[in-house]
Image (cartoon, rainbow, N blue to C red):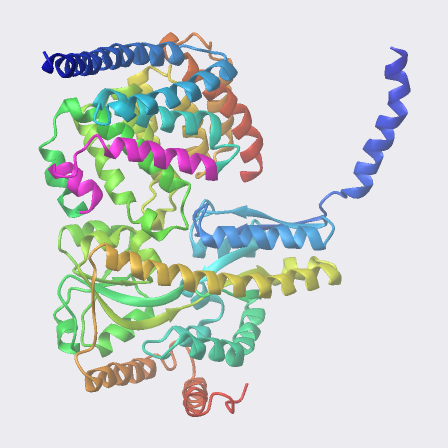
């Protein structure tokens, strides 16, 4: 009889754990749906508030489920997207912090004992081999971790430790391009176009390659993912001092319908806002 | 409506006040550099621009073209002659065209430390600035690129280890050519843009550059060792075409030059800090630093420097300049305080 209360407590604890797991499981699904809904939002203020609160909710979920890959991926992607869309133009230092936070969640997708986890953290020479063994299902994790990482580095160019991490990011993105070039609207080509255009030629920049990558990304997304035009203008047209192309690319963004790609309405709304901002900011570059 | 009318005089006054306080910029200096956006180089250059704008009350300022958007140093000098650009950041490459004798300060194994570098620029800098003036340029300040090191794929402790290296050379750079000839190396000339792939394909297995660039160029991922003895000190400067400079009113010239000196000095210090940090980063990334195997071996390198410098007499500078520089450094080494300034 004396055992009964203990058993009862154990049962309650067990069920509580199960309930929590079920709750987290359904919450993860809801959060994933929430992300889809947010990506369709065209009102920037509403989306900004929504993403910010969702990110905190995701972090709360990770407290109880620290290894939940789906939540880790959403958090990594969420911080990178939030920093790019709402922070970096006004406050690059704060944005860098968010990108780094996204990177930290992204790295947690790769256990330290795995080949890829080890190479990303401490053995960059082993990255090529590790990537060779990765599969197409790893594309989202590798892509978003690289996006967060590369973006953090681009806002930290006086930090030599950060600069030394860039070759790893380049390798990850090159791998994504090879494995799944269509992922995220031609995201790998978009990223490589930006990277090749933003470095001076003596530091590995290559404007011809930059243009080819942006053109390929536009081909993949059918010219509907408008951020491609914005970054094409910012990183290729500015680097080549092509003011006509710069104006043409940004005008294409201005005149495109916000509903051109409903599932990426938010990215396209951000693209429209950046087009206005970049036109003002880089007008004197030519 | 009445309210709006009443506001108009106030608005007009405010607009007039703005016009008085912010005069239109009369003089724009179009400036080009190899340095990427966000680098320390660009950050200090922006500070320089801010200071000039502030002190001139907005009459003078730069339009900065970073990241080689205006081409390379040869393009800068050509465009400055044509008046399409007015000023540029140049390194040894550009110096060869406008004051080649200044490249003596980049000759191999010349300096033992940064104090010696500062001493030599203070003593001989004005002489090189005169040469620049004759070529049609005014120096706004020397800005050091940094100490150049040799990076290889096999350890270098003795001179003989180096002669086994398939060493890259930046196309036809006379200083590198003389240095490697004196070291007994037959270098492989390649454009800088082909170095990384040539390291990957093992066409070359040795390169030289400043630590910061070894990281920025990604070369550190393809080499294993660094000889911890600087090969040379890479020079840099910000120059403006003499024509543009003389077009500026006297007060603006003073503002430009005094701030040029101040911010280029700051840039030299920042560059030294960045390169020191880069050395640490290289260590963290597994690059092994090797030392000359003995004091005698270290002296061998210094002797090699002496003979390489003699090979460049008549090509880059006269014997007299080399004699004066070497003896001034000797005096400085013995009694730094007594050395002629």
State left or right for residue B256 relative to residue A78: right
State the extent of the magenta-drawn residues as a range: A93-122
Q: x, y percentage for residue A3?
A: 10, 15
> Could you say which is closer to the camera, residue B251 or residue B321?
B251
* Number of numbered tags placed on the structure image: 0
- The residue closer to the viewer here, B22 or B206, is B22
In the image, residue B322 sits, relative to residue B205, either above or below, namely below
Using residue B72 as the reference point, say whether residue A119 is left or right of it. Answer: left
* Residue at x-position 53% and y-position 33%: A90
Q: From the viewer's perspective, is residue A146 above or below residue A44?
A: below
Q: With B134 as the anchor, is B21 left or right in this view?
A: right
Examine the structure image and report whether residue A112 is included in the region drawn in magenta: yes
Rendered image quadrant of residue A240: top left
Counting from the top left corner in percent of width and height, residue A104 is at: 30, 35
Say which residue appears at 18% left-offset and 83% top-offset.
B294
Seen from the viewer's position, the closer of residues B253 and A258 is A258
- Could you tell me if residue B190 is visible in this image? no
Please tell me whether the stretch drawn in magenta is mainly helix, strand or loop.
Answer: helix
Residue A96 on image: x %, y %: 41, 38
The quadrant holding residue B105 is: bottom left
Q: Quadrant of the C terminus of chain A?
A: top right
Residue B9 falls inside the magenta stretch = no
Q: Quadrant of the N terminus of chain A?
A: top left
What x and y, as percent, mark residue B263? 56, 61
Q: Residue furthest front?
A: A1
Residue A116 shows in this picture? yes
Location of residue A221 by image quarter: top left
- B298, above or below B58, in the image: below
Give the residue at x 34% y 72%: B232
């Amino acid at each position: 009889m004396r055992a009964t209360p203990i058993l009862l407590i154990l049962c309650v604890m067990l069920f509580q754990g199960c309930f929590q797991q079920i709750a987290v499981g359904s919450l993860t699904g809801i959060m994933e749906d929430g992300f889809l809904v947010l990506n369709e939002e065209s009102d920037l203020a509403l989306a900004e508030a929504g993403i910010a609160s969702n990110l905190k909710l995701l972090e709360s979920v990770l407290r109880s489920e620290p290894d939940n890959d789906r939540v880790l991926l959403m958090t990594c992607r969420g911080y990178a997207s939030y920093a790019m869309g709402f922070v970096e133009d006004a406050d690059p230092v704060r944005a860098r912090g968010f990108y780094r936070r996204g990177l930290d969640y992204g790295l947690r997708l790769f256990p330290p004992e795995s080949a890829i986890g080890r190479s990303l953290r401490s053995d960059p020479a082993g990255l090529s081999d590790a990537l060779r063994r990765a599969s197409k299902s790893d594309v989202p994790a590798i892509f978003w971790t690289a996006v967060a990482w590369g973006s953090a580095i681009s806002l930290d160019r006086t930090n030599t430790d950060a600069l030394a991490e860039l070759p790893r990011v380049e390798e990850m993105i090159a791998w994504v391009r090879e494995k799944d070039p269509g992922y995220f609207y031609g995201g790998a080509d978009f990223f490589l176009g930006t990277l090749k255009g933003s470095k001076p030629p003596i530091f590995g920049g290559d404007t011809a390659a930059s243009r080819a990558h942006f053109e390929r990304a536009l081909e993949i997304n059918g010219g509907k993912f408008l951020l491609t035009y914005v970054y094409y203008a910012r990183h290729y047209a500015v680097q080549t001092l092509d003011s006509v192309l710069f104006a043409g690319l940004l005008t294409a963004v201005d005149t495109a319908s916000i509903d051109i790609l409903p599932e990426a309405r938010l990215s396209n709304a951000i693209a429209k806002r950046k087009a206005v901002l970049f036109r003002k900011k880089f007008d004197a570059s030519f | 409506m009445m309210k709006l009318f009443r506001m108009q005089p106030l608005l007009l006054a405010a607009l007039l006040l703005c016009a008085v306080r912010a005069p239109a910029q009369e003089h724009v200096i179009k400036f080009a550099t190899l340095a990427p956006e966000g680098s320390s180089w660009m950050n200090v250059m922006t500070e320089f621009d801010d200071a000039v704008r502030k002190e001139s009350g907005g009459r003078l300022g730069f339009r900065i073209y970073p990241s080689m958007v205006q081409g390379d140093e040869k393009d800068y000098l050509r465009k400055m002659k044509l008046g399409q650009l007015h000023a540029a950041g140049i390194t040894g490459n550009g110096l060869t065209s406008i004051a080649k004798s200044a490249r003596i300060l980049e000759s191999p194994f010349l300096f033992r430390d940064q104090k010696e570098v500062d001493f030599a620029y203070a003593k001989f800098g004005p002489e090189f600035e005169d040469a620049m003036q004759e070529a049609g340029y005014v120096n706004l300040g020397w800005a050091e690129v940094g100490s150049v090191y040799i990076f290889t794929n096999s350890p270098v402790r003795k001179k003989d280890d180096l002669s086994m290296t398939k060493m890259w050379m930046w196309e036809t750079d006379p200083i590198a050519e003389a240095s490697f000839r004196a070291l007994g190396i037959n270098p492989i000339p390649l454009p800088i843009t082909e170095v990384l792939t040539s390291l990957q394909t093992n066409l070359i297995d040795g390169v030289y550059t400043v630590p910061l660039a070894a990281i920025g160029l990604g070369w550190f991922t393809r080499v294993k060792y660094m000889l911890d003895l600087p090969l040379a000190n890479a020079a840099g400067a910000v120059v403006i075409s003499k024509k543009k400079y003389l077009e500026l009113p006297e007060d603006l010239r003073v503002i430009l030059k005094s701030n040029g000196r101040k911010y280029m000095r700051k840039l030299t210090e920042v560059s030294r800090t960045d390169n020191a940090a880069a050395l640490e980063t290289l260590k963290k990334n597994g690059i092994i630093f090797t030392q000359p195997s003995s004091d005698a071996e270290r002296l061998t390198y210094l002797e090699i420097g002496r003979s390489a410098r003699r090979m460049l007499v008549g090509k880059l500078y006269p014997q007299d300049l080399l004699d004066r520089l070497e003896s001034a450094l000797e005096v400085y080494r013995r009694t730094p305080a007594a050395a002629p300034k």
